[in-house]
Image (spheres, coloured by chain):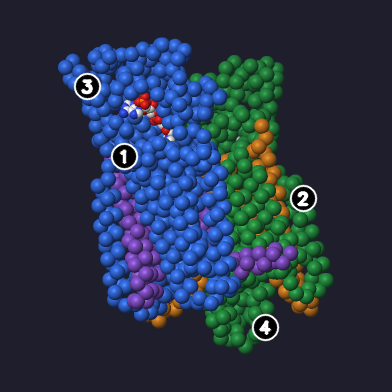
Chain colours: A green, B blue, C purple, D orange
Amino acid sequence: MQHQLLSVIYIIASVLFIIGLKMMGNPKSARKGNLISAAGMCLAIAGTIFLHEGEVSTIVYVLIFLAIVTGTIIGWTTAKRVQMTKIPELVSMFNGMGGACAALISLIEFNHLYTANPAAMEDPVPAAAGTLICIISGLVIGSVSFAGSIIAFFKLNGTLEKPVRLPKYNYINLAILALVVIVSTQLFLSGSVALIYVLLALSLLYGVMFVFPIGGADMPVVISLLNSFTGVAAAFGGFLYGNHVMLTGGILVGSAGTLLTIVMCKAMNRPILQVIFGAFGTHAATASNDAKGNVRDISITDTATLMNYSKKVIIIPGYGLAVAQAQYAIHELQTILEDHGVEVKYAIHPVAGRMPGHMNVLLAEANVDYEKLCEMDDINPEFPTTDVVFVVGANDVVNPAAKTDPSSPIFGMPILEAENARNIIINKRSMNAGYAGIDNLLFYDPKTSMLFGDAKSVITRLVSELKQM
Amino acid sequence: MQHQLLSVIYIIASVLFIIGLKMMGNPKSARKGNLISAAGMCLAIAGTIFLHEGEVSTIVYVLIFLAIVTGTIIGWTTAKRVQMTKIPELVSMFNGMGGACAALISLIEFNHLYTANPAAMEDPVPAAAGTLICIISGLVIGSVSFAGSIIAFFKLNGTLEKPVRLPKYNYINLAILALVVIVSTQLFLSGSVALIYVLLALSLLYGVMFVFPIGGADMPVVISLLNSFTGVAAAFGGFLYGNHVMLTGGILVGSAGTLLTIVMCKAMNRPILQVIFGAFGTHAATASNDAKGNVRDISITDTATLMNYSKKVIIIPGYGLAVAQAQYAIHELQTILEDHGVEVKYAIHPVAGRMPGHMNVLLAEANVDYEKLCEMDDINPEFPTTDVVFVVGANDVVNPAAKTDPSSPIFGMPILEAENARNIIINKRSMNAGYAGIDNLLFYDPKTSMLFGDAKSVITRLVSELKQM
Amino acid sequence: MELIKNFLTLLSENEQMIYFVILSIFVGIEVIGGVPTVLHTPLMSGANAIHGVVIVGAIFVMLNTSQDDYISLVLGFFAVLLGTLNVVGGFVVTDRMLEMFKKK
Amino acid sequence: MELIKNFLTLLSENEQMIYFVILSIFVGIEVIGGVPTVLHTPLMSGANAIHGVVIVGAIFVMLNTSQDDYISLVLGFFAVLLGTLNVVGGFVVTDRMLEMFKKK
Ligand SMILES: NC(=O)c1ccc[n+]([C@@H]2O[C@H](COP(=O)([O-])OP(=O)(O)OC[C@H]3O[C@@H](n4cnc5c(N)ncnc54)[C@H](OP(=O)(O)O)[C@@H]3O)[C@@H](O)[C@H]2O)c1
Ligand SMILES: NC(=O)c1ccc[n+]([C@@H]2O[C@H](COP(=O)([O-])OP(=O)(O)OC[C@H]3O[C@@H](n4cnc5c(N)ncnc54)[C@H](OP(=O)(O)O)[C@@H]3O)[C@@H](O)[C@H]2O)c1
């Protein structure tokens, strides 16, 4: 009876996952969708614990509850406390935990299998073959996902900012991967206990080496990919136990995550293979800024005056704004300009920053009114009637080369057409290139003035100038 | 071995169905999608015949091939020959065939079950219970779909144009449905051979009575609904045999068809329950055309002159154009106007006519250039700069009440804003209402002139007038 | 109570099948999402052809009917015939319709 | 030949499972179709929480581990702990993110 009830609960949980994920794809229902998935998860977990049939000693129950309570407390507080800008790191970390969980399950099950029937392991019977395949796959994929996520975490964290690349790293990685496959096969054929630890070590190594050469800026894509890896690892767990809720959850995330990775890559106009094996995650040496024409500087006071006497100012935020943590300062700038009767809007490029929706999250954190954030297609026609465009720490997303230069790596990416405004003021710290590592001709436009300096300090000084006007 | 191969073939066919259906949802890939589904079907059929295991006498093979060849010839030629405007009828007919097929299978299987084990039928064992449920469900749903489709066919055909409504027909239908359920239960419990024929008769009756009261104009929705019924009937066949390709195909069509029905109803702003049980499928008595103001007539010659000296004419085709078979005439009108230097466009409302895409199919048949057909949202802004709007046999799709009168049954349906044009000429045969059975204030607009008469003859005469100018 | 228990048993015994049905329904619904109105008729017609897969059942019935069971053979013959009409007619007419749309 | 035969047998023996996997993959893909760019991050994070369902496996392992199998118990404890982190952290952080978007 309990067993049957559990089956039904798993069915319900699976349906909730699907519906929740579906709703998460629509801005209006997204939050509810997340809660629905969460409800499905609670159902699945509670069912698994309370509808278990067979003798279980109290100590096991105590351990399970201890683990869940501890995990809940840590997970909840971390998630609640973290700064919005650190979210990719956090997602990466949680993803790693899931991978580790899958790997641990495989380890334990392998031991069970081995202790249960050590002789049979010498020549695994076909009956155990399926189990063994699931265990090995879960171990490998889970470990890769775990190790990769941790490296991604440190990269986003800044600890490992510079991508470290061994010479011919792609070949080295390929060799490690080959080793993983060989050892897996060997393990499958021999069932040796020692080998599984070798396999574990190799998989972890591969996870590390896989993410190491990729530039920190590409981490969102990598995390999305590792996310779908963990999904697949969970699905193998499902195969192992014939557990349908693990299967639906795992496969769903596996396929949805893979598609999401591809969609993300498309949005920033980079093929996924280039991200993984790829050339330009490391920024090419700073683009040469000779001979492109002259760059015009502008002082803070002049900028403040110009803005103060404008009718309409559009702010284009970019990655630099996030790095400088200048979201509160820019909100202040907006408020004071509005007090002075200037119309202010934000133009949000879909891939500005380093994760999708980065700018929305960032500005929402600083309490910027949602209505002020305009999407690319809506705001582009407004630039010709704009007095001042203020580009803060953005670069690629306003690079006209995307429209004019077919040889440019970002050619074809839709951009914010800042060049159509009457005045363009660009704040960044130097003439250095942005994420794509390419020069930006907008800087040399006669209508453009450069306002060098860290975004936060520059904007703060701008605000205090404006206050005196 | 053959059996295994067949399983794999069924898997491939199922995937082809899904991919094909998916592609059919996009104008660019639709045709390919249809072919992909067809390929899946061929695979499934060929596999079923050639990978069958066990003794089969030649006569059976001969019969099967005879049936397939005959069916292919009839189906192919009918489908190739039919006029484009008769497509809903044809779809309805083919749908009925599928339903009948499902019902026949159930009949045969019931007989098999009965002859195989007449004693067990007295008290059907749980093992046979599932089989029996599948047989009964397949029979009922298949027969309803068959009978309903045939009635729908005759309604579209014109043979049964007027909806026939017994007094309190909804209750009568409900009673028949209740009888169907009772007899089904009885059959399930007793397994009596006689009862299955009673059930068959009742199901057929229900199918007839279900569609009878619904107005001919609502048939596309009804067909879409019956379409998903047949899907479900096919799925029950799949359950019966544990046949996965029948299951995927059937369920897919069942769910996709149901959604499509709902979407279609939404597009024409009518709740689905209203269509089925509903009030206004029969047009209310012709709307009173008193006291709304005066209607201005216009002669053919005046119309020709007005058009000839216009810069831009927009044609709004509607159901009347289809009824009058005036698609070739209107194309001629377009050509001659263009020869005289007038810009001509067609404004296509999504639910103009009696089936989705009706106007597109109709005008495509008459070789009208696809580029000339403008969708509602694209053309609406153009009306204010249009000299003459020529409304041919359309009514509801240009009724301003949809925007202004919250009590109107079509309130909320987006319309073609013909009222914004400089001159409006409306061709129809009388002041009678259209599909929704409501009056149209546009006819009384001072800018409007009515050009009464059958669309085809009116347009033909218009063309000959224009030729002399 | 007994009833609930039987029901649960039924559900859990057919677990695989239930997942199959639920997932198929979702696929069916999702696959249709956001079809433009112009494609409604071809889509209806295409879906109509797909449920013609019921012909597989009809063929199966015939292959398992013994040579001297005349009634079943006759009924089966018509089942296959009607199924073929559904399949062939459905796909061909859909193709014709879509061909019209393509025309530039 | 033998290999192909074995392969086919494997496939047809796991027919139900294969349909299940294929359909789930389709559902996963379809469900994501057409998400606006702004939602990519929350969606990634939400999906991340869902694969935390692996915790069900971890709990299951523990429930089937005997009281004196210390290694398994310790490993299992950590598996459940990490799984919980994945689940709870994932859903909470997604909710926070989406809350930000909602704000008017
Ligand atoms: N959103 C996503 O999902 C995502 C994910 C991965 C990659 N990407 C890619 O990231 C790029 C985003 O474009 P973007 O225009 O936002 O950024 P960007 O092109 O990377 O440019 C950022 C600019 O900010 C400046 N900057 C850095 N720190 C600063 C500070 N403290 N104060 C002021 N300025 C600072 C940098 O110039 P200085 O060094 O001279 O100051 C740099 O040129 C696109 O190429 C996109 O494809 C996006
Ligand atoms: N497209 C779909 O999928 C679909 C399906 C079901 C229902 N509908 C509904 O159908 C309606 C479509 O609107 P519509 O404007 O196309 O059609 P309508 O509102 O039904 O009006 C058609 C008009 O054509 C006139 N007419 C009939 N025969 C004619 C002939 N031989 N020559 C000239 N005129 C003739 C009729 O007036 P006279 O009698 O005075 O001539 C009638 O008023 C909407 O209400 C829609 O919701 C659409």
Horizontally, residue B32 falls left or right of residue A219, namely left
Say which amino acid is labelled 4.
Ala
Q: Secondary structure at mark 2?
A: helix
Looking at the rendered image, the quarter that the N terminus of chain B falls into is bottom left
Any part of residue A383 in sight: no
Residue found 52% across the figure and 21% down from its top? B404
Q: Label 1 near label 2: C-beta < 8 Å?
A: no
Residue ID at (27%, 38%):
B365
Say which chain tag 4 marks. A
Position of residue B465 in the picture relative to residue D94 (left or right): left
Q: Are marks 3 and 4 on the same chain?
A: no
Check disc 2 and report the residue beneath it.
A77
- Distance from the alpha carbon under mark 4 to that under mark 2: 40 Å
Give the x, y percent position of residue B469.
18, 15
Q: Disc 4 vs disc 2: which is toward the camera?
A: 4
Q: Which mark is residue A116?
A: 4
- Is label 1's Cβ within 8 Å of ligand 2? no
Name of the residue lying farthest toward the bottom: A119
Rendering coords of residue D2 (x, y %): 40, 81
Give the residue type at disc 3. Answer: Arg
Image x and y of residue B76, in percent: 27, 54
Are the residues under marks 3 and 2 on the same chain?
A: no
Q: Residue at label 1?
A: B85
* First-in-chain label (4 vs 2): 2
Q: Are marks 4 and 1 on the same chain?
A: no
